[in-house]
Each structure stands twice: as C-alpha cells, then as structure tokens.
Image: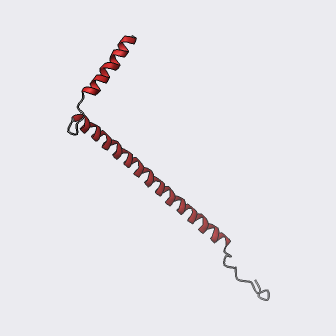
Amino acid sequence: MVVREKLRNIVTYVRTLWRPTGPDSYHQYRAEHERERKQAAHARVQSERSDEREREGAERERGYEERYRAERVAEEPGPEAPRRDPSQPK
C-alpha cells in the first residue's frame, strides 16, 4: 500500500515535469481558460449580490417613507367638526 502511494506520487511529479509549459501549450491554454471562467463566475456572483443589496436598500427606504408618512398623518391635527350653536334647536 505505501509503495503504491509513493509510486503514484512519483508518477504525478514526473508528469508535471514532462508537461510542456510554454505559452502556446495546451496546459497553459486550459489553465488560462479555467482562470477566466472562474473570474467570470466570481464577477457574476458579485454583481448579483450588489443588485440584491440595492434592491433591499430601496425596499427599506420605501418602508421607512411609508411608515414616516403614516406617522406624520397620524400626528397632524385632523379637520375639526363644525361647532354647534347652542342657541339653535337640534
């Protein structure tokens, strides 16, 4: 078992040495493509999070405005009922 693991590690190491690392190699192309894919996914997630935060902020603002508008309306003195003249019969 231990010998098999050591042999596997050696083979993996030799493959990394044998693999071409020039700028035109498939390995470089694949690594760059993978890096670009991950960056695009990361940018997409960040954009979604930013949009979600903006929506939540707008909803919160609307909630505040509605609540404060309702409080101001409740605090304003309402129209008073016309006073009845006591000298007039009902």
Q: Residue furthest right?
A: 87
Quarter of the figure with the N terminus: top left
Question: Residue at 31% across / 23% down in the picture?
Answer: 12
x and y percentages locating residue 28 in the rendered image:
25, 37
Quarter of the figure with the C terminus: bottom right
x and y percentages locating residue 36 in the rendered image:
31, 44
In the rendered image, the vertical position of residue 7 relative to residue 56, given as above or below: above
x and y percentages locating residue 73 in the rendered image:
63, 71
Quadrant of res 19: top left
Q: Residue furthest bottom?
A: 87
Q: How many marks?
A: 0
Quadrant of res 84: bottom right
What colour scheme does the image use? secondary structure
Q: Is residue 11 left or right of residue 26?
A: right
Q: Residue furthest left?
A: 24
* Between 18 and 36, the one nearer to me in the picture: 18
In the rendered image, the vertical position of residue 82 relative to residue 63, given as above or below: below
Question: Residue at 22% across / 36% down in the picture?
Answer: 22
* Between 37 and 68, the one nearer to me in the picture: 37
In the rendered image, the vertical position of residue 5 relative to residue 65, given as above or below: above
Q: Is residue 23 left or right of residue 55?
A: left
Question: Residue at 44% across / 53% down in the picture?
Answer: 50
In the rendered image, the vertical position of residue 61 relative to residue 31, given as above or below: below
Question: Residue at 57% across / 63% down in the picture?
Answer: 64
* Between 27 and 67, the one nearer to me in the picture: 27
